[in-house]
Amino acid sequence: MSAELIDLALKISQIIALLVGGLWVYVNYVRGRTHVPRLQLELKAAVLRKENRRYLLATLAVKNPGLSIVQITQKGSALLVSRLSALDEVPQVIDSHWEHDGAFDVLTKHASIEPGLTINEQKLIMLPVSESDAFLLQLRVVAHGRSWSTISIVGPGSSAGEGFV
């Protein structure tokens, strides 16, 4: 009879160990949020000159660090460009004022992003002749009813476009 009790205790302890191990994996899975759609955005920009024209070169990267496919929604996803408003002399430090200039489609050739994948894209935007000191770019990506965004500010002294031909 003692052998049967030992066998029963062993089976019960194995079942408890399996349940505790399964619960531990589930808690770590939920805590790690690897199943939740996530995106990491990167945005860089430079003002380029060619003859009498000015261009804004925007380089964007969108990475899916999670373990599930992220379906991109084109409606709402865009690169928004604003220019610094020209203000007269200001008596104190104030926040900059930006005038919205335009919105440009992004990631139009991609309906989704696979896990671990990074999508890189560049936009070359022709700027108006009028000089502006700085531009504010906002990259906004919509997926699964959520939105991610990042902002970059670029000035005319940008050296990133020295090799522009």
Image: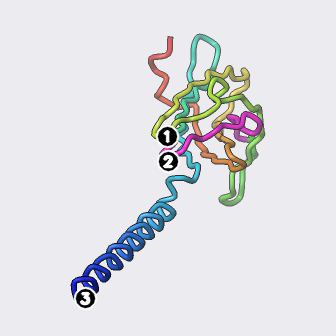
Comes first in the chain, label 2 or label 3: 3
Comes first in the chain, label 1 or label 2: 2
Q: Which residues are magenta?
A: 64-84
Q: Can see residue 81?
A: no
The percent position of residue 84, horizontal first and vertical second, equals: 70, 40
| Disc 1 + disc 2, Cβ < 8 Å | yes
Foreground pick, 18 / 5? 5
Foreground pick, 136 / 138? 138
Spatial separation of the CA atoms under disc 2 and disc 3: 53 Å
Q: Can see residue 104?
A: yes
Amino acid type at circle 3 is Met
- Provide the residue designation for mark 3: 1
- Provide the residue designation for mark 2: 66
Spatial separation of the CA atoms under disc 1 and disc 2: 6 Å
Magenta residues: mostly which secondary structure? strand
Which of the 4 image quarters holds residue 68? top right
Amino acid type at circle 2 is Gly
Comes first in the chain, label 1 or label 3: 3
In-image side of 78 versus 161 (left or right) = right
User: For residue 115, which numbered disc appears in the image?
Assistant: 1
